[in-house]
Amino acid sequence: MRILVAGAGYVGEAFALQARACGDTIEAWTGTEESAAGLAQKHGLSALAVDVSDAGSVRHAASLAAPPDTVLLSVSSGRGGAESYRRVYENGARHLVAAFPRARLIFTGSTSVYAQTAGEWVDEDSPAEPDRETGRILLEAESVVRAAGGTVARLAGIYGPGRSVLLRRFLAGEAVLEGDGLRWINQAHRDDIVSALQLLCARDDTAGQVYNVGDDRPLTQRECYDWLAAHFQRPLPPPAPPDYDRKRGWTHKRVANARLRALGWSPRFPSFLAAVEAGLEAG
């Protein structure tokens, strides 16, 4: 299979390398000449610097190689706000659909589109009504992808080798226990996300569908910090008021992964604590 990875960052790069190891032909797009050169030099990937938010940049890059069978849109907003989200996610999806009308598009979205706050379980049929404009833009990008016969992978909080905001803050003494500590945390290890994306790429029966990609066991903040404190023999983080001003909104829900599991996927790391116990290091 010929796969274009549009956004070869933390998840996209790992996916590209794993897909190539499985025999797929990979082209990687990234945001800067420097990162494209790094992918080529470090991994021998065919890589280009392409701004997916710019239609001309996408058209030019598309003219340089054979059309892909599958396009993975796995870009980042670069910590930007609503304007950046619209350019990168929604416009990026539109430009890729226009440039590769015969390719399957897989989009890595976010479980932040579920705005539930009562601690309930949510699945792909639950209402997705985010209260932040960034979340609404992600839904618009999903609509573009699904209308073109593509597939949406809604990712829970991403962590993995060299990257865990939660663990890094805990070990640095920067973490706080919000309110009663009972807010649910939903996460997914990078390598489990990669295996989920590979499965979705390999199947031809997921057109127009949405799949949650998260581990088997959401954790309350208190449960997580209690375990980390015992494991590392550190004190619990101090209490603090809940942060209701998160960029993607304050939510309190548990994300179910049953639809993805029904396709045959299972996470190597069923919970964040299992990954820490296996030797995860904070970046």
Image: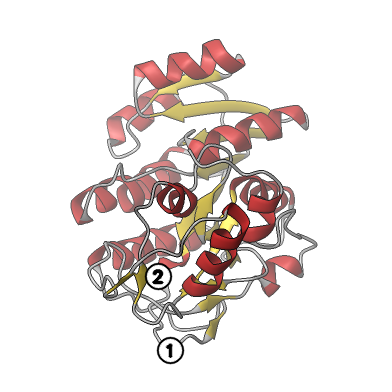
Q: Which mark is residue 244?
A: none
Q: Nearer the viewer, mark 1 or mark 2?
A: 1
Q: Is residue 102 left or right of residue 57?
A: right
In front here: 227 or 124?
227
Residue 208 at x, y percent in the picture: 56, 65
Task: Give, as a three-letter code, the residue at label 2.
Answer: Val
Q: Is residue 100 left or right of residue 69?
A: left
Q: Quadrant of residue 265?
A: bottom right
Residue beneath the point at 47% across and 44% down: 74
| Quarter occupied by the N terminus | top right
The residue lying furthest to the top in this view is 41
Residue beneath the point at 36% across and 43% down: 95
Label 1 sits on a secondary structure element that is loop
Residue identifier under label 1 = 118
Task: Give, as a three-letter code, the residue at label 1.
Answer: Ala
Dot placed on the residue nearer the N-terminal end, 1 or 2: 2
Residue 175 at x, y percent in the picture: 37, 58
Residue beneath the point at 27% across and 70% down: 243
